Amino acid sequence: MAALSTVLATALTGWAAPTASAVSDDWQPDGSSQERAAASCWEIKQELPDAADGTYWLVTPTLVAPQQFYCDMTTDGGGWVLVGRGRDGWLEGGDGQGTTAQVRQNIWSQAGFKPRQLSDEVIDGLLDGGAPKDLADGVRVVRAADVTGSTTTVVSYALKQMTKWSWAWGAGQPANVVLTGPTGETRTVNNTTTRDVSSSGGLWRAWTFGADANDWVKGFNYDQSVAGTTAASSFLYSTTGTYATPMAQVWIRPKLTTDEVSYPSISDDGAEELTQLPLAESGALAGTWGVTGRANGSSTELNTEAHAFAQIGNVMYVGGNFANVEEHSDRSASGTATQTIAQSYLAAFDATTGDWISGFRPVLDNQVNALAALPNGDLVVGGEFTTVNGLSQPGLVALDPDTGATDTSWNIKVENRISSETLNVQTLDVQDGWLYLGGNFTHFTGGSYAYTVYARKAARLKAADATPDKNWNPSFDGKVHSLDVSDDGSKVYMAGYFTTSGSTTAMREAIISTESGAAVIPFTPVFSQSTSKYQQAVREVGDLVWFGGSEHSMFGYDAATMTPTSLNITKAGGDIQAITDNDDRVVYGGCHCDDWNFSGQQAYSVSPGATSPTWSSADRIGFVGAWDAETGEYLPAFAPTSKARNGYGAWALHVADDGTLWAGGSYTSIVARDGKNQWAGGFVRFAARPHTAPAAPSSPAVSLASGVATVSWTGSSDAADYEVIRNGRVVATTTETTVTVADSAETDRFFVRATDGYGNRSATTALAPVEVEPEEVTLVAAGSTWSYRNDTTAPDSTWAALGFDDSGWPTGAAPLGWGDSSIVTNVDVASGSTRPLTTYYRHAFTVTDPTELEDVTLTTRADDGVAVYLNGVEVGRKNLASGTLTSTTYATAAPKTSVAVQNPLTIDIDTSLLQPGNNVLSVEVHSNYRSTPTTSMDLLLEAVRD
């Protein structure tokens, strides 16, 4: 969904690059793990020139959390990321196809023929919100050139206008294109679009829209001369034998680096929750009931099967021009009805399940156009009928919501005394105790007023008893097709076929005061062209007022100034016919349009494939589109796939109390959320996407040791995952309540939040306190290499000092000595030589800052006797008498090597003996007698760094 990055930007305070402490000296963005996720495949290639093709972790501030993607590290210098692959059946909606995990599989085989496409949101995340038109290397599409897939062609698109990603390439995204043939020959086509690129046809063509020529198959198609088959294994697909659709891969190469992107900074108190818009899912809910037939015999677009909705309690009422309610238990789009029940024009359905409610059985003689709930719980019905339940009741009636019986206490008679017109109540709205209505009518009689009231094309009645308001008559000269009372109750927005209200000009759109007199509130509407200006839908949602109607216009106006701020043309297709809202966050528009919405476009003259368009973006629309109610931005993630009788599409929209979108019109089939193409009878239903943040975790804590942070927290009951944030960047996702994060430092700032797997994130915890665990440091490891001297003459008296030159001494790895199988370096004298009584050893080591160290411990063995010196100062001895030691001093015991190892000498070292930089340990080992059979030396020096 395009709105996520905007929500993130506003929910977090400020923007700042990660602090220097975010990574250790060894850290690099090599994509090997979540904490080492790179900003792009290209960055990994720069860090690791020998990086191979494969799956890597990537993250950007807009992507939010690290995810794995497939990187091509070979082609043209490498650094490409796979965003889509497949053969026939590519989709143009913002949800893409499949999961990110499926797209990361680089499959060039039959197993990859089913298209898998990253969503617009994920691709925009890979671009970190950057524009696809700014991609230096464009978009690379690799296409199979033969049925075996052994040769390929390449289409390189330099997009010229796309500011956010869109898969709606059939609409014609402006581009300059380079075509590369199977043998490497290239041809350039400038000032073209993604809709259709050609340089002499054949393999030198790429077209992406649906057409009769190839049975409406969408993909990156070749020209007529390229043959394909329907064989399951063929890399070139065609149902007609021509215009083959090839297996294809789509690659982009964002050149982002971690140093260049900016992650959000978070205050010590944490960040607020992040939620998605309550946008409807593109796949419809499973349903078996619908309405069928045209009871009044008319099949025009103004007489579709489902034409109006209203909800009372858990009942959804459906009105329109239908003859039956019908059940299809197997849901199959090609199946037959399980049962067909005669019930014309008005029926009731369970608002949760969509099942028909058989107890509501009103009898009307003609079409229902509008429904509304009255404050007393009745259902008010408007339409073209003349009788209800066997009695004369033209145009308007109140019914018992349980049975459909007429409420005779709500007494109203509607007339149209214009002989050339048919009585018609087209639209209803209830607010502040009034029922507002529009259509074709002139007079009302009823309620508590004894006389007939004149009100032409628009009127209002007291909702309680149907008394007409004789002082409120906008008196339009043409039909009011839709009306909506403002949220504050001060005005009514009108749309229709009128040109005046009384003597005041009101061209197709009007704002009428709710005060007595029904004064026109002037504003200047805009239209898509100078003729055919009629309008069919209007709705105020939040700070915007939306008008929709002829020549495919969906225009949003600032409610305060009535200046247009969101301009949209739906094409190829038709007019906007219905508008509804959802919690003031999403606006839906219904139409007989099943191709594209062109945002930023006012003129109807827009043509798909225009090389120099005036629109800002082109996206898929499938009979119903969605717009952000706050920004007016089109939301391409909602892109249902459906069929409708004669393509009439959606003529009624209503968001149920549970957030489900009901769309009614002439629907005959719909792709459901399970991917099945199911039967539809007049109307379809779409569940709202999850849009509530899970509960936040609590009690975060960080334990830091040796550069590894162990982050723990108390979980929340409704979390699918947790995200651990370090310095504004997500470095780990987990289902557990503890995780380790490498490359960490004491100054790092950690937070934790819960996620639901749908993009909704809880508020973060407060800043997690960092407890630094003492770090165990090995200053001299067991088995280290030592310099040694084994000679019958005594060494220089300074042999243990730091500055002594031992470069002439031989070296070897510990344990050093003789006579035991554990010895690594034998230091014994040659056979027949006199064995010295004492052997001397030295080992240099480095300490950066001794003041950071504590608990310095030396462990060695006395085999037979040992004395140890640090920087020339004796620190301990064992099995040696006190006093001055010489080369001829005997050890006081003669343990075996194994016994000496089992009974080590442990010495606590005064850290004041250490110095910054170079240090030396010196050891002298004495035998108990000259022919002692075993002697050995090894040493371990450890410390704790606080």
Image: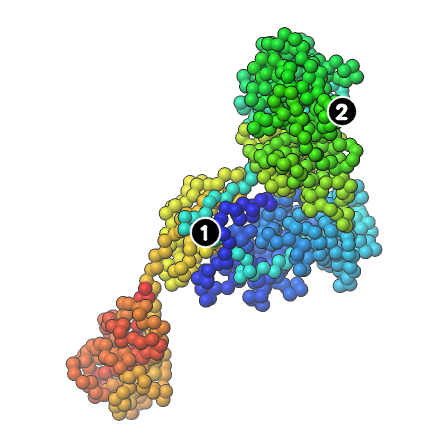
Camera-near label (1 vs 2) is: 1
Which amino acid is tagged 1?
Answer: Ile
Identify the residue under disc 1: 266
Give neighbour class at mark 1: few <14, some 14-19, many 20+ (Cα, 10 Å).
Answer: many
Q: Measuring from the top left, give residue 243's x and y in whole percent.
A: 79, 48
Q: Secondary structure at mark 1?
A: loop
- Residue 729 coordinates in the image, percent (x, y): 49, 54
Q: Is residue 612 left or right of residue 462?
A: right
Is residue 230 at least partly visible in the picture? no
Q: Split into 4 quadrants, where in the image is the C terminus? A: bottom left
Q: Position of residue 743 (x, y in %)?
A: 44, 61
- Viewer-nearest residue: 629 or 24: 629
Residue type at the position of mark 2: Ser
Residue at (59, 22) in percent of width and height: 430
Q: Alpha carbon of mark 1 to alpha carbon of mark 2: how far?
A: 59 Å
- How would you rate the neighbour count of disc 2 (Cα within 10 Å): few for under 14, some for 14-19, many for 20 or more? some
> In the structure shown, which secondary structural element does the residue marked by tag 2 occupy?
loop
Residue wearing tag 2: 299
Name which residue lies at 61% across and 27% down. Answer: 491
Q: Quadrant of residue 625?
A: top right
| Left or right, residue 48 beside residue 181 | left
Compared with residue 414, is residue 291 higher up or lower down, i.e. above or below? Answer: below
Residue 811 visible in the displayed image: yes
Q: Residue at x 31, y 66 (%)?
A: 944
Task: Kindly indicate whether the residue at mark 2 contacts the one at mark 1 (C-beta within 8 angstroms).
Answer: no
Q: Is residue 642 above or below residue 259?
A: above
Query: Which residue is painted at 57% across and 29% down in the image?
Result: 487
Check residue 537 in the rendering and tell me which mark sits there, or answer none: none
Which image quadrant for residue 282? top right
Residue 502 versus residue 182 in the image, above or below: above
Front position in the image: 385 or 832: 385
Looking at the image, tell me whether mark 1 or mark 2 is earlier in sequence order: 1
